[in-house]
Image (tube, rainbow, N blue to C red):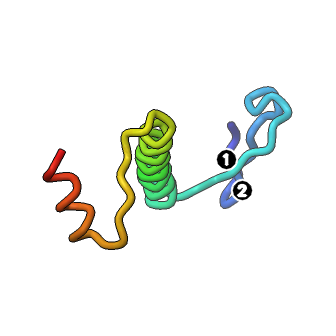
Amino acid sequence: MKNTGSVLTIPKKMTKGEELIVLTRREYENSVCRSREILGVLKIIAEGEQAYREGNTISASSLDEALKIYAKR
């Protein structure tokens, strides 16, 4: 890499022809954090879908009703 004042030239062979995006550390860390949160939510959804397919869910019109049904199990 060659630094010429405020311009930084990155050799093409370093990026192997791919486009390059520059982020601040804060933006990068926020993106990583959001990605982890999204993956966690997707895992919970997948587990819920599997439980539904296996018939391990209950139907209720409210949280109170669901808790009562669940307590009886």
64 vs 10, nearest the viewer = 64
Give the class, few, some or many, for how many residues have Cα within 10 Å of label 2's Cα (few <14, many ≥20).
Answer: few
x%, y% of residue 11?
A: 78, 34
Q: Residues within 10 Å of mark 1 (few under 14, many from 20)?
A: few
9 left or right of 31?
A: right
Amino acid under disc 1: Asn
Residue position marked by numbered label 2 in the rendering: 7
Residue 42 coordinates in the image, percent (x, y): 49, 46
Percent position of residue 36, x then y: 43, 46
- Cα gap from disc 2 to disc 1, whole angstroms: 6 Å
Q: Quadrant of the C terminus?
A: top left
Relative to 35, residue 43 above or below: above
Q: Secondary structure at mark 2?
A: strand
Please state, as top left, top right, bottom left or bottom right, where the N terminus lies in the image.
top right
| Residue 31 drawn at (x, y percent) | 50, 55
Q: Residue at x 42, y 52 (%)?
A: 37
Q: Is residue 4 left or right of residue 55?
A: right
In the rendered structure, the answer to whether residue 63 lies left or right of residue 57 reads left
Q: Secondary structure at mark 1?
A: strand
**Residue located 39% across and 58% down the image:** 59
Residue closest to the far right:
17
Instruction: Out of 53 and 34, give the one closest to the viewer.
Output: 53
Disc assigned to residue 52: none
Seen at 37% across and 40% down, the residue is: 56
Count of numbered marks: 2
In the rendered structure, are the residues bearing label 2 and label 1 in contact, judged by CB atoms less than 8 Å apart? yes
Residue identified by numbered label 1: 3
Query: What's the amino acid at mark 2?
Result: Val
Q: Is residue 67 above or below residue 73?
A: below
